[in-house]
Amino acid sequence: MSQTDLPDRASLEYLRKLAKERLRELRRANPGARLAEAQLEIARAHGFGSWRALKAEVDRRNASGIDAFLAACSAGDTRALRAMAEADPALVNARGPGGTTPLHQALKHPGTVRLLLSLGADPNVREDGDNALPLHVAAGYGPIDSVRALLDGGSDVHGAGDLHAMDVIGWATIFAAPRLDVVALLVEHGARHNIFSAIAMGDPDLVQRVVEEDPQALRRRLSTHEQEQSALHYVIAPADGLLGGTFRTGEHYRILERLIDLGADLEAKDARGRTPLAVAMLRGDTKAMGLLQAGGAREPAMDDSPEVPAMAALRPAVKAVRPMVAVPDVNATVTWYQAIGFELAGSHGEDGRMDWASVSLGAADVMFVTAGASWRPYAGLSLWFDTNRIDALYEALRRQQLERSRDLLAGREPQGPDVHFILDLHTAFYGQREFGVQDPNGVELMFAQPTA
């Protein structure tokens, strides 16, 4: 068999099915046979030297058709979508670049979602990036009618196994403000809260019910992308670089107390080795520090880091400062700055709407971010300091804050300033390592160094 035996619209899903069937046959003779062996046989049967080569050829052949189909799904163009699906039914379950699917692309348009489902789209397909169902994404960001359409179409209301280990109900609660109407709909269809979604709802009694129904709930962790936070870590602070809910209003200390009373592990460590008390100390969260200490949490030992340079010695490591201002409309702001002579140096956003942009005039740079943007936990004014010694600056400021927090825990008058960390050191999705502290006026001081 040769490559020409592949149909013009070869289906990778069909080839995967063939490989699984072949694996079952192989295991009758050899129980230790692996899927890779079956995939290699299928690839060679079609004239390819490897499964990867076969997949690449299938992706190449499907690219143009799926691109147009995905574009119609994103636009909600049901007329074009229907015509293409009639000509090639396999499109409704095809994958595009990055592993996205038509259902994932159509979520802004409930009518398009229903049409795809009626044409045979799989309601439980997962995209490659977050291993998320369309229902995960719809619960987090889509219209409730899309959520309803997917549930009516048979989507799994639980959705365990997403990359962030949050389940569908977690996407509706944890990333930003809980979507109460979506949560109610999910619960109506059988969804059950996990410990993190219950915390994000800001309801201590709900947290207690979750633990009473499943005592193991307190052992649950978020994914490595959220530093494997425990429930106690999550109540105190969002994962590094992420927003992580809107429930930390002061009332959340009632949840912290309840979790301590329920027996949450006070010495649990996140993926960076920090206990909940260590996180509270870094953030200067005296209320959380007091509650954890009263509950029996042990003060973390000081690390054996080498001598940390004084801030005065690190002054030459700061190369520039760039202000970032929160504005209602980044597009309109950039248009105005361009009109008076600034140049657009960089931007981020979707569907033509920027949520971040940088403009320049000569050697001067100014950045703008949408006020309340979901990926920026703070609003107002930020000062971004470019440096080539991010780790040394971090350790110098971190050491000051931990020493101050130790004084507070010991009942001593703190000697140093409150270096309130708002973001711990992390690698951001836009390609730099950064951390942030807040001055007494609420201005963010962000320190950043490119990763490459």
Image (spheres, rainbow, N blue to C red):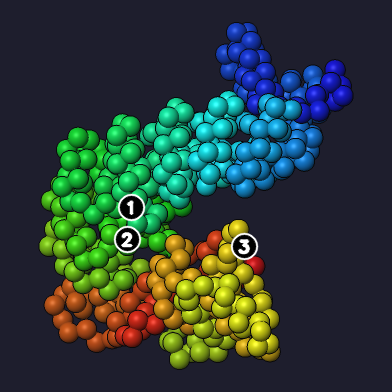
The answer to which image quadrant residue 254 occupies is bottom left
Q: Quadrant of the C terminus?
A: bottom right
Q: Are marks 1 and 2 in contact (CB under 8 Å)?
A: yes
Q: Which residue is depicted at the point 44% across and 27% down?
A: 154
- Please give the label number shown on residue 54: none
Q: Residue at label 1?
A: 178
Q: Can residue 305 be seen from the camera position used here?
A: no
Residue that label 2 marks: 246
Which residue is disc 3 drawn over? 352
Query: Real-space Cα distance between discs 3 and 1?
Result: 26 Å
- Secondary element under disc 3, as helix, strand or loop, is loop
The span from disc 1 to disc 2 (Cα, nearest Å) is 8 Å
Mark in front: 3 vs 1: 3
Q: Quadrant of residue 76?
A: top right
Q: Circles 3 and 2: CB distance less than 8 Å?
A: no
Identify the mark nearer the N-term, 3 or 2.
2
Question: Foreground: 51 or 189?
Answer: 189
Using the image as rendered, state which of residue 324 and residue 162 is in the foreground.
324
Q: Are marks 3 and 1 in contact (CB under 8 Å)?
A: no
Q: Position of residue 216 (x, y in %)?
A: 25, 38
- What's the residue at 74%, 21% (across, down)? 42
Quadrant showing the N terminus: top right
Q: What amino acid type is highlighted by mark number 1?
A: Pro
Q: Secondary structure at mark 1?
A: loop
Identify the residue at image location x=53%, y=67%. 355
The image shows residue 429 at horizontal and vertical percentages of 55, 61
The residue under label 2 is which amino acid type?
Thr
In the depicted structure, whether residue 32 falls above or below residue 313: above
